[in-house]
Amino acid sequence: MYVALPYQFSASEIAGLLAKVANLDLAAGPGGTRMSDDTSTRFYLQEALQIHPPFRPAWLYASVVAIYPGNQIQSHRDAPIAGRRLHVPLQQNLGCWSFHDGEWAQLVLGQTYGIDPSLEHGALNWGSTLRLNLLVDVHG
């Protein structure tokens, strides 16, 4: 299940992150999804994220995950990580759903969530607009 952490991005902070995300290569790949590369994501977003406590530890990995309308990230498991995986919805619609460890959820815009990536998870976008989630792996 997605665990809501006590860290919320304000509407103005989300707008600032989205302005920086516009610099990332998020063109739809095969299957209608794309993950930005770690190097570019760090370059554009690190300064903006350092003001929030869960992102202050050294990052292991960072990406913005795009799901285009009518597409999905199929259910899968990732290798365990040495730390925590955090998700922050930056842009979504009412047709966006996330799946983690047997439970479906509609995540709240700007809320920081923790997940265990080694458990089954995926997401879909049945809406008509792009869905963007920030994904960051942090130590501890």
Image: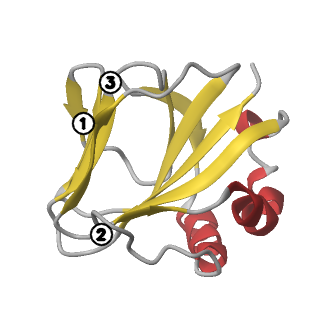
Q: Are the residues at dot 1 and dot 2 in contact (C-beta closer than 8 Å)?
A: no
The three-letter code of the residue at mark 1 reads Ala
Residue of label 2: 68
**Left or right side of 5 for 34:** left
Residue at 29%, 69% in the rendered image? 68
The x, y position of residue 123, in whole percent, is 28, 45
The x, y position of residue 23, in whole percent, is 65, 80
Q: Is residue 88 above or below residue 40?
A: above
Pointer 1: residues within 10 angstroms few (<14), some, or many (20+)? Answer: few
**Left or right side of 32 for 13:** right
Quadrant in the picture for the N terminus: top left
Dot 3 or dot 2: first in sequence order is 2
C-alpha separation, residue under disc 3 versus residue under disc 2? 21 Å
Q: Are the residues at dot 3 and dot 1 in contact (C-beta closer than 8 Å)?
A: no
The three-letter code of the residue at mark 3 reads Glu
Residue at 77%, 25% in the rendered image? 139
Pointer 3: residues within 10 angstroms few (<14), some, or many (20+)? Answer: some
Mark 2 falls on what kind of element?
loop
The three-letter code of the residue at mark 2 reads Tyr
Q: Is residue 1 above or below residue 33?
A: above
Numbered label attached to residue 105: 1
On the image, which quarter does residue 81 sit in? top right
Q: Nearer the viewer, residue 13 or 82?
A: 82
Q: Residue furthest front?
A: 30
Residue at 33%, 32% in the rendered image? 76
Q: Is residue 12 above or below residue 124?
A: below
The x, y position of residue 78, in whole percent, is 47, 28
Residue of label 3: 120
**Left or right side of 28 for 85:** right
